[in-house]
C-alpha cells in the first residue's frame, strides 16, 4: 500500500467511501465527527461519492437521524453551516439500529452498505469508526469479520478504534490479539486525537525541518523537559467512565506519552508511516518500567475536592454524578520519567495532567542547561532563570524561546525576553476539531498518525507498573487538592527535590 508523506499538505479529495460510525447517536459523533466531516467538506477534501451510516441501539429512521444531526451541527459546527455544503453531507446520512453483539445487525448493515454503494457510487470502500464504549471494541471487530464486512475483495475496509485501547498491559494485549484475528494491522487505525492537533504535528516539523535545534536536542544541552496538560473541566457527565479510568489511563498513557515520543524520538529515516512509528515505539521502549519503590518516589497522584474555579464554587470529584463518595480514582498525576538511551540518559521528563486546574493549557517546556559560567552574577535575580523553549499546544498555538538580554541603560541588568512565533501569524484561524486530519488520513490510507500495536504495548508497559502500585496502596489523603489550584503539594515536591519548579506560562 502506498505510504504518504506526513509533511506534505493533503490536496486531493479522499477516496470515495462509506463511513460507518458505531455509536452514531453518541457524543463523539455529534461533537466531533460530524463537525469534522463538515469541515473537510468545506475544505474540498471529501469525495463526492460519500455516505455516512450511524449505527446505534435506538430505533430511528434515516430521516429522524438526519434531523438530529441538523440540530447538532447547528450547535457544534466550528464554522458557519452553509448550504449547499452541509446539505450534501446531510443527504448522505443514513442510520441503522441494532445491538452490537447481534449478528443480525451486521447482516442488515451489509445489505444497507450494498444499497448505498449503488446509490452514492462509493464503491466497496468502507471506513468503520468504533465510537463506542471500549467494552464493545473486540465484539464489533469480531462480528464485522464474521459477517465478511472487512474483507478487501472489492475496495478497502479500514477500522478506526477509539481510546482507551485496553486498561492495562494484559487487556491491551488481549484486545490487540482479538483485533489481529479479525483484521490485518494495516487495516487498523488506533486513533489519538492529540496527534490531529496542528501544533502537535508541528513538533516534528520544528525538530526535523530546522537545522538549528537538532544539534542541541540532547543531554549535553537540555536539563529537563516538562509536559503539562492542564484542564479546567471536571469529569462532567462522564463520571461512570472516569471511575474506571483516572488521569493516567485517560490522558497520560496515550496523549502525553505521544507528546513525549515526538519530543524525544530519533529522526526517522523518512516520513513514511513505519519509519516514524518505529522511532516513536523505540523511544517509549527506552523508558524503563518503574519498580514499586520508583513509583513511590517518582509519581504523585491527586484528586480534586470542592473549590473555586473561574469565580464559581465547583463540587469535589467524589460529589460528581456516577462517582463513588469514597472514590480513590486520581484526577491528577505527575511523574518523572527517564528515557534511557544515548540522547537522553540523565535528562528527566516531568509529566503532569489534571482536571479542575486553574487554566486549560497544554505545553511542552524544554529547559536548557545554564551557561557554564555565570559571568553576570549579581546583576539581577532574573538572570538565574535558564533558557527555555516552550511549545504551546493549546489554547495558544505558538512557540517561544526565552533568552536573556541586557536592559538598555548604563548598568548591566539582565532580563528575560521572548522570541516567539504564533500560529495566528499565518493569518488563519483554525476551525478544526482535531479529527479532520485523522479522518482524512484514514480515508487516504495513511497510518502515520495512528498508533501501531507495539506502540500501544510500549505505552502500557510504562503505565501498568504505576497503576499496579496505585491499585494496591489506596490513597489516604484524597481529596488532596482543591478545584482551582495547581494540584497537590507533593507534585511541587516531586520536581522541587531536583531543584526545579513547574513552569506555568500563565503565571510567568
Ligand atoms: C480526552 C479525554 O481523550 O481528551 C478527556 O478522555 C479530556 O478526559 C480530553 O478532557 C482533552 O482533550 P482536548 O483536546 O480538549 O485537550
Image: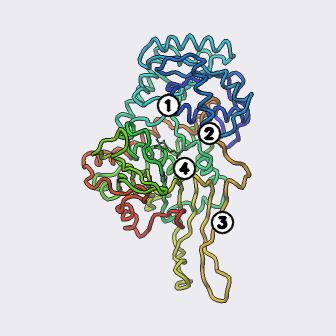
Residue 43 visible in this rendered orientation of the protein: yes
Query: Mark 2 or 4 closer to N-term?
Result: 4
Which residue bears the numbered disc 2? 272
Which residue bears the numbered disc 3? 419
Q: Do the residues bearing badges 2 and 1 touch, measured as CB atoms within 8 Å?
A: no
Which residue bears the numbered disc 4? 262
Residue displayed at 53% across by 80% down? 373
Q: Looking at the rendered structure, which numbered label has been put on residue 298?
A: none
Which residue bears the numbered disc 1? 161
Between marks 3 and 2, how big is the CA–CA gap?
A: 32 Å
Q: Check disc 4 and report its element: helix, strand or loop.
A: helix
Q: Residues within 10 Å of mark 3 (few under 14, many from 20)?
A: few
Quarter where residue 62 is shown: top right
Residue displayed at 59% across by 31% down? 72
Query: Mark 4 or 1 closer to N-term?
Result: 1
Quarter where residue 10 is shown: top right
Q: Do the residues bearing badges 2 and 4 touch, measured as CB atoms within 8 Å?
A: no
Q: Do the residues bearing badges 3 and 2 touch, measured as CB atoms within 8 Å?
A: no
Between marks 3 and 1, how big is the CA–CA gap?
A: 40 Å
**Whether residue 373 is situated above or below residue 491 in the rendered picture:** below
The total number of labels drawn is: 4
Residue displayed at 27% across by 45% down? 326
Amino acid at each position: 500500500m502506498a505510504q504518504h508523506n506526513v509533511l506534505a499538505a493533503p490536496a486531493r479529495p479522499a477516496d470515495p467511501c462509506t463511513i460507518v460510525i458505531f455509536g452514531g447517536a453518541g457524543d463523539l459523533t455529534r461533537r466531533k465527527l460530524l463537525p469534522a466531516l463538515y469541515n473537510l467538506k468545506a475544505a474540498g477534501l471529501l469525495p463526492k461519492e460519500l455516505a455516512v451510516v450511524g449505527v446505534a441501539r435506538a430505533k430511528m429512521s434515516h430521516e429522524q437521524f438526519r434531523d438530529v444531526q441538523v440540530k447538532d451541527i447547528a450547535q457544534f459546527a466550528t464554522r458557519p453551516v452553509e448550504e449547499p455544503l452541509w446539505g450534501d453531507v446531510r443527504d448522505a446520512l443514513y442510520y441503522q439500529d441494532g445491538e452490537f453483539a447481534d449478528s443480525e445487525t451486521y447482516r442488515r448493515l451489509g445489505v444497507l452498505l450494498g444499497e448505498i454503494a449503488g446509490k452514492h457510487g462509493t464503491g466497496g470502500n468502507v471506513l468503520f469508526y468504533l465510537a463506542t464504549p471500549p467494552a464493545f471494541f473486540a465484539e464489533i471487530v469480531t462480528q464485522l469479520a464474521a459477517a465478511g464486512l472487512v474483507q478487501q475483495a472489492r475496495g478497502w475496509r479500514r477500522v478506526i478504534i477509539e481510546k482507551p485501547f485496553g486498561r492495562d498491559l494484559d487487556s491491551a494485549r488481549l484486545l490487540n490479539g482479538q483485533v489481529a484475528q479479525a483484521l490485518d494491522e494495516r487495516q487498523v487505525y488506533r486513533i489519538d486525537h492529540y496527534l490531529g492537533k496542528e501544533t502537535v504535528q508541528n513538533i516534528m516539523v520544528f525538530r526535523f525541518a530546522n537545522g538549528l535545534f537538532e544539534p542541541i536536542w540532547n543531554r549535553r544541552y537540555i536539563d529537563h523537559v516538562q509536559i503539562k496538560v492542564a484542564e479546567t473541566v471536571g469529569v462532567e457527565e462522564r463520571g461512570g467512565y472516569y471511575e474506571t479510568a483516572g488521569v493516567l489511563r485517560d490522558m497520560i498513557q496515550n496523549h502525553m506519552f505521544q507528546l513525549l515520543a515526538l519530543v524525544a524520538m530519533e529522526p526517522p529515516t523518512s516520513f513514511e508511516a513505519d519509519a516514524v512509528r518505529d522511532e516513536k515505539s523505540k523511544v517509549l521502549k527506552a523508558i524503563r518500567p518503574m519498580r514499586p519503590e520508583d513509583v513511590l518516589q517518582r509519581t504523585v497522584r491527586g484528586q480534586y475536592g470542592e473549590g473555586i474555579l473561574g469565580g464559581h464554587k465547583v463540587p469535589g470529584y467524589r460529589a460528581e454524578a456516577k462517582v463513588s463518595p469514597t472514590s480513590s480514582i486520581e484526577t491528577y498525576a505527575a511523574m518523572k520519567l527517564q528515557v534511557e538511551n544515548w540522547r537522553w540518559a540523565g535528562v528527566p521528563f516531568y509529566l503532569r495532567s489534571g482536571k479542575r486546574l486553574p487554566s486549560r493549557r497544554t505545553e511542552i517546556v524544554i529547559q536548557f542547561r545554564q551557561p557554564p559560567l555565570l559571568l553576570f552574577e549579581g546583576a539581577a535575580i532574573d538572570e538565574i532563570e535558564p533558557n527555555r523553549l516552550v511549545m504551546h499546544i493549546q489554547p495558544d498555538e505558538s512557540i517561544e524561546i526565552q533568552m536573556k538580554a541586557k536592559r538598555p541603560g548604563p548598568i548591566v541588568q539582565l532580563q528575560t525576553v521572548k522570541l516567539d512565533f504564533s500560529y495566528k501569524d499565518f493569518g488563519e484561524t483554525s476551525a478544526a476539531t482535531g479529527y479532520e486530519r485523522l479522518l482524512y488520513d484514514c480515508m487516504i490510507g495513511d497510518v502515520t498518525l495512528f498508533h501501531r500495536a507495539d506502540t500501544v504495548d510500549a505505552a502500557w508497559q510504562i503505565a501498568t507498573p504505576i497503576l499496579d502500585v496505585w491499585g494496591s496502596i489506596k490513597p489516604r489523603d484524597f481529596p488532596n487538592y482543591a478545584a482551582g489550584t495547581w494540584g497537590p503539594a507533593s507534585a511541587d515536591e516531586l520536581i522541587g527535590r531536583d531543584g526545579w519548579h513547574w513552569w506555568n506560562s500563565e503565571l510567568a
